[in-house]
Image (cartoon, rainbow, N blue to C red):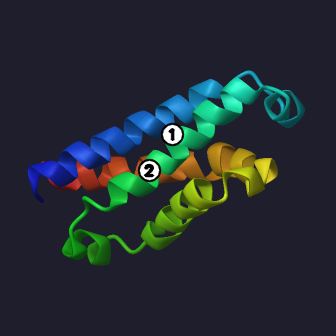
Amino acid sequence: MKNKEILSINKMIEYIDRAVLYIKNYSLETFSEDMKTIDATVFVISQLGELVINIEKDTLEKHTNIPWRTIKRIRNRIVHDYEGINLDVIWHIVKNDLPELKNNLNSILKDNK
């Protein structure tokens, strides 16, 4: 695994940690009313998609348990249709999908030590 990939995966983990932290003590209702937290959370989720670009094809193919294309699609949706973002979906991503993604990314790093 190339150094750029390792750095990108570490950065993805950092962004996941930020998103989880941003909404840690929030309910969906509180989150939906806090524009600063929405903006910060959506930004870090979009960055995950940006970082997928740095992952080599063989790594993507080896780790099919990670929805790489979906991560990129979410980034594209955020960037090209920010006003159309569904906050329920963002909430679900942070609460349910990102912790699993973090575990999978940590496994990749562990396997490459």
Query: In the image shown, does 30 or 108 lie closer to the viewer?
Result: 30
On-image quarter of the N terminus: bottom left
Q: Secondary structure at mark 1?
A: helix
Q: Is residue 25 above or below residue 12?
A: above
x, y percent for residue 51: 34, 53
Which residue was labeled with disc 1? 44
Q: Is residue 78 left or right of residue 58?
A: right
* Residue in view at x 51 percent, y 29 percent: 18
Residue 23 at least partly seen: no
Residue 77 at least partly seen: yes
- Could you say which quadrant of the image residue 62 lies in? bottom left
Residue flagged by tag 2: what amino acid is it?
A: Leu
Q: Is residue 7 above or below residue 52?
A: above
Q: Secondary structure at mark 2?
A: helix
Query: In the image shown, does 42 or 70 lie closer to the viewer?
Result: 42
* Residue in view at x 30 percent, y 48 percent: 9
Residue flagged by tag 1: what amino acid is it?
A: Val
Which residue was labeled with disc 2? 48
x, y percent for residue 33: 85, 29
Query: In the image shown, does 88 or 36 lie closer to the viewer?
Result: 36
Tell me if mark 1 has few (under 14), some (14-19) or many (20+) residues whose alpha carbon lies within 10 angstroms of its own: some
Task: Determine the residue located farthest toward the top in the rendered image.
Answer: 25
Q: Are marks 2 and 1 in contact (CB under 8 Å)?
A: yes
Q: Is residue 35 left or right of residue 79?
A: right
Q: Is residue 16 left or right of residue 40?
A: left
Q: CA distance from mark 2 to mark 1?
A: 7 Å
